[in-house]
Image: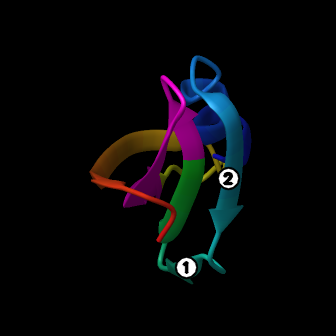
Amino acid sequence: MADYITWSFTGENDPQVTFSAPVVDAGQAAIEFRVHAYDNGRPITLAGCVFVQFDTDGLAVRTRDYWHTADGHL
């Protein structure tokens, strides 16, 4: 998941991506993330959460992302 989120923001300038500890239970996980970046020189923060369901082999079979962008580095 970290590689996917980091890749998602390669178009942003100077992205700094951080993650909370995942919450894992019964083949599912939730991971909060925060991205501090610059959009046309303007600081922005994108904060969100990824929900993942895994199969018995440990492969992700379903994901959902929720996120919000705000001005400034919050």
Q: Position of residue 31 (x, y in %)?
A: 52, 67
Q: Position of residue 23 (x, y in %)?
A: 53, 82
Q: Residue at x 45, y 55 (%)?
A: 45
Q: Residue at x 57, y 29 (%)?
A: 9
Compare residues 28 and 42 and report the one nearer the observer.
42
Label drawn at residue 5: none
Q: Which residues are magenta?
A: 37-53
From the viewer's perspective, is 65 left or right of 38?
A: left
Quarter location, residue 22: bottom right
Q: Depth-wise, is mark 2 or mark 1 nearer the camera?
A: 2
Q: Residue at x 30, y 47 (%)?
A: 64
Q: Position of residue 66 (x, y in %)?
A: 27, 54
Q: Amino acid at mark 1?
A: Val
47 drawn magenta? yes
Mark 1 crowdedness (10 Å alpha carbons): few <14, some 14-19, many ≥20: few
Q: Amino acid at mark 2?
A: Val
Compare residues 13 and 29 and report the one nearer the observer.
13
Label drawn at residue 17: 2
Q: Secondary structure at mark 1?
A: strand
64 drawn magenta? no
Which residue matches tag 1? 24
The residues tagged by marks 2 and 1 sit, at their Cα atoms, a distance apart of 20 Å
Mark 2 crowdedness (10 Å alpha carbons): few <14, some 14-19, many ≥20: some
Q: Secondary structure at mark 2?
A: strand
Compare residues 63 and 43 and report the one nearer the observer.
43
Chief secondary structure of the magenta portion: strand
Vertical relation: 25 (above or below) 49: below
